Image (spheres, rainbow, N blue to C red):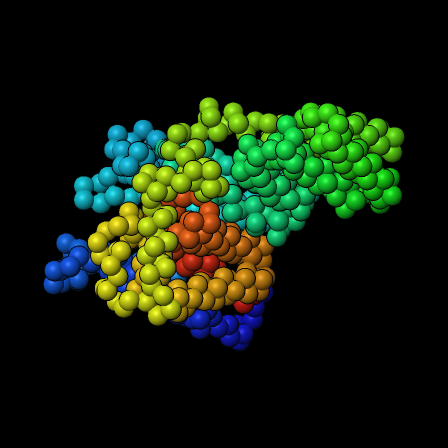
């Protein structure tokens, strides 16, 4: 217990003012961007509440006030009521599914008179609090599968409700929590499996119709099956001490594959992927044999990885053609270069790239962008706000914005690492992961590097829900961090 003579720093003195300064700078740049994106030639008052730039000032002002309120609450409040806040947001998400107001095909908005709120934006900080509360309980460990499954369930529940609202993009943001799981001890093989699935999907779909070496073999299928064998062998080498046998098995598999390809090219043309499937089955059987022989579960996990990889890959066609909506399928084809569709699904990205490219090194200047002023880019003040930065501020301005975000990310890492208690550290990494996901996907989306899934750029995209949601995320963490030196906390 702290003595009465011990003087602990005040909350204001313990606040990380560097992060608050970055926050205010991002808000300022964000307003300038919204103003540039929503400005119409002939407007005389950009501060009018009838304009989006005027309304964004209201959202910014209320966000700053909201941040101040969050800082005045006791830090124990967020720990104590984490589950209550999470439960309340889950109920709100569930109720929103039955919302009669459908906006742009989504039922994720609650319309309260002139005010529209998106509960999915607030569910992020509620989920971060709940998972931090769960993972900071005594005895919790990521190596315990029951504990890990319960943490995953906390993350998956809001995802399911948001998907039911037809807001897939916002639901995908929750995958960022797995970055925090990895930091807190989740096996790297799980994260690797997720990355491998993305690689299978992209390579398989992109090159499925491309013949390999003028044979009946699909280049996409050939590469994916080859990657499955290599990745499986790599997992065994990483988690099993006996590496010699694994290397020999993989070498034999590759040798048979090469000989089969040469036979198909010069002797008798046939689909080499049939041989690859047989070899993969043989690899799985060998792994199961080793598992039964030495009773080492890592062999079983590698076998399951191989089987799961094959099943996932061969289910891609079904998902693309029978599960995904037509517009989602077209977006993926456009992203992978299988279709162009500049007048349809690829229109937004194409116009965004034109706007960014036209900005050059220093940009066209504030309110001087032609692509944005003439409204060529849809959603240019929300999801595609970064194209306005590129057009009006050029490469220099875009780089400055990205450096600001980099400073925020690095600062969040430092704050998370200095937390003396698991709750603060885990919540901090949740905040970091969410910001990183939004930044990477949104900027990549505008540049045509990632799929168009419709998520905002933090502190830049127009709207109150996203701005308030990000403010909740950041300032709750700042309040928790401000109490890091309190000796009375248990």
Give 233 or 45, whichever is nearer the viewer.
Answer: 233
Residue at screen point 56% across, 45% down: 178
User: For residue 301, what is the image quadrant?
Assistant: top right
Quadrant position of the C terminus in the picture = bottom right
Place of residue 68 in the rendered image (x, y in percent of width and height, measured from the top left):
34, 62
Residue 3 vs 388, above or below: the answer is below
Observer able to see residue 257? no
Q: Residue at x 50, y 36 (%)?
A: 156
Quarter assignment of residue 362: bottom left
- Tell me where residue 311 appears, x and y as whole percent: 63, 27
**Quadrant of image for the N terminus:** bottom right
Does 415 sit left or right of 60 as displayed? right
Report the side of 264 relative to 486 (left or right).
right
Q: Nearer the viewer, residue 258 or 480?
A: 258
Res. 425 image quadrant: bottom right
Q: Position of residue 348 (x, y in %)?
A: 33, 46
Along the line of sight, which residue is nearer the eye, 201 or 455? 201
Q: Residue at 58% across / 58% down in the picture?
A: 421
Tell me if residue 287 comes above or below residue 420 in the rendering: above
Residue 218 vs residue 59: left or right?
Answer: right
Q: Is residue 103 visible?
A: yes
**Residue 312 on image: x %, y %:** 60, 30
């Amino acid at each position: 217990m702290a003595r009465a003579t011990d003087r602990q720093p005040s909350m204001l003195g313990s606040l990380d003012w560097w992060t608050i300064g970055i926050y205010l700078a991002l808000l300022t740049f964000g307003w300038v961007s919204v103003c540039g994106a929503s400005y119409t030639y002939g407007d005389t008052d950009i501060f009018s509440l009838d304009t989006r730039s005027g309304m964004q000032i209201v959202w910014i002002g209320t966000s700053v006030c909201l941040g101040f309120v969050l800082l005045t609450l006791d830090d124990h409040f967020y720990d104590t009521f984490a589950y209550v806040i999470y439960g309340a947001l889950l109920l709100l998400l569930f109720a929103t599914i039955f919302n009669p107001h459908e906006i742009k095909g989504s039922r994720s908005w609650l319309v309260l008179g002139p005010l529209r709120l998106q509960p999915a934006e607030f569910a992020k900080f509620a989920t971060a609090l709940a998972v931090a509360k769960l993972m900071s309980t005594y005895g919790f460990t990521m190596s315990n599968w029951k504990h890990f499954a319960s943490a995953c369930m906390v993350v998956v529940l809001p995802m399911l409700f948001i998907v039911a609202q037809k807001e897939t993009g916002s639901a995908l943001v929750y995958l960022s929590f797995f970055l925090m799981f990895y930091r807190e001890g989740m096996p790297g093989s799980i994260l690797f499996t997720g990355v491998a699935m993305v690689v299978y999907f992209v390579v398989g779909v992109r090159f499925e119709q491309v013949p390999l070496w003028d044979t009946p073999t699909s280049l996409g299928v050939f590469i994916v099956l080859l990657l499955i064998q290599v990745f499986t062998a790599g997992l065994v080498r990483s988690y099993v001490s006996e590496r010699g046998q694994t290397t020999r098995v993989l070498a034999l598999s590759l040798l048979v594959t090469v000989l089969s390809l040469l036979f198909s090219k010069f002797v008798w043309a046939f689909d080499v992927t049939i041989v690859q499937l047989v070899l993969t089955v043989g690899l799985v059987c060998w792994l199961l044999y080793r598992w039964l022989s030495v009773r080492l579960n890592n062999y079983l996990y590698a076998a399951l990885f191989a089987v799961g990889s094959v099943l996932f890959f061969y289910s891609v066609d079904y998902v693309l053609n029978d599960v995904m909506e037509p517009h989602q399928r077209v977006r993926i084809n456009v992203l992978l270069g299988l279709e162009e569709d500049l007048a349809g699904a690829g229109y937004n990205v194409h116009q965004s790239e034109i706007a960014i490219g036209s900005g050059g090194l220093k940009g066209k200047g504030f309110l001087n962008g032609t692509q944005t002023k003439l409204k060529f880019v849809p959603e240019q003040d929300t999801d595609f706000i970064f194209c306005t930065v590129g057009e009006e501020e050029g490469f220099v301005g875009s780089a400055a914005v990205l450096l600001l975000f980099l400073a925020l990310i690095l600062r969040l890492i430092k704050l998370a690492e200095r937390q003396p208690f698991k709750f603060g550290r885990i919540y901090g990494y949740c905040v970091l992961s969410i910001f990183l996901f939004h930044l990477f996907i949104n900027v990549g989306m505008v540049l045509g590097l990632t799929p168009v899934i419709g998520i905002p750029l933090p502190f830049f995209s127009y709207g109150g829900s996203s701005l308030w949601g990000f403010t909740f995320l950041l300032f709750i963490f700042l309040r928790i961090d401000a109490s890091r030196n309190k000796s009375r906390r248990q």
